[in-house]
Each structure stands twice: as structure tokens, then as C-alpha cells.
Amino acid sequence: MALRFQKHYPPRAHISSLTHGTSADACWTTERDRLLLDAADALHTRHDIDDRPWQRLSAEFSPDNSWTC
């Protein structure tokens, strides 16, 4: 019996948004996704994250706040 492994690719809208869009694009439906995209963009562009986004990241991903991927 041959096993088949399904490949999981992100939707095209996500790929397009990651390369040419912003976290405000409609394909990002959760605040957590938007927060992570904004943080990645800030690190890529400025090599730094401002205090307000850092506080939001700390609150969202604190050890006390259980989360899953």
C-alpha cells in the first residue's frame, strides 16, 4: 500500500499579500496574523520593533497565554 503525502501550500492570496501587500489585506483574518506580519515587516525594514507593537506581541505570545500554531 503506497502512502500519499498531501502537500500544504498557502493560498495564492496569502502569497500575493506577503510579496506585494500588507497586513491590512483581506486574506489575513486574525489579529494575530496581522500582528506577526507587521512585526516581520518592521524587522525587515527598520531592524527594530517599536514599543507599541512589542507590547502587543508580548501580550499575545506571553508564556501565560497558551497558543497553538
Image (spheres, rainbow, N blue to C red):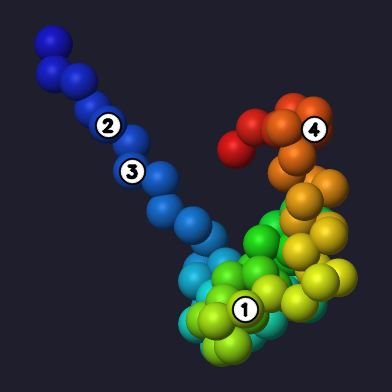
When asked about the image quadrant of residue 35, the answer is bottom right
| Mark closer to the chain start, 2 or 1 | 2
Query: Which secondary structure lies at badge 3?
Result: loop
| Mark closer to the chain start, 1 or 4 | 1
Q: Amino acid at mark 4?
A: Asn
Residue position for label 2: 5
Identify the mark at residue 48; answer none if there is no mark. Answer: 1
Q: Amino acid at mark 1?
A: Asp
**Residue lying at 57% horizontally and 77% vertically, measured from the top left:** 43
Asked whether residue 27 appears in the rendered view, the answer is no
Cα distance in 3D space between marks 3 and 4: 30 Å
Residue 26 horizontal side relative to residue 2, left or right: right
Residue position for label 3: 7
| Mark closer to the chain start, 3 or 4 | 3
**Residue lying at 53% horizontally and 61% vertically, measured from the top left:** 11
Identify the mark at residue 19; answer none if there is no mark. Answer: none
Q: Mark 3 and mark 2 in contact? Answer it, CB < 8 Å.
A: yes
Residue 31 horizontal side relative to residue 1, left or right: right
Cα distance in 3D space between marks 3 and 2: 6 Å
Query: Which secondary structure lies at badge 1?
Result: loop
| Mark closer to the chain start, 1 or 3 | 3
Looking at the image, residue 6 lies above or below residue 2: below
Local packing at callout 1 (Cα closer than 10 Å; few below 14, some 14-19, many 20+) is few
**Residue lying at 72% horizontally and 32% vertically, measured from the top left:** 63
Looking at the image, residue 23 lies above or below residue 62: below
Query: Which secondary structure lies at badge 2?
Result: loop
Measured as percent of width and height from the top left, residue 46 is found at 59, 88
Cα distance in 3D space between marks 2 and 1: 39 Å
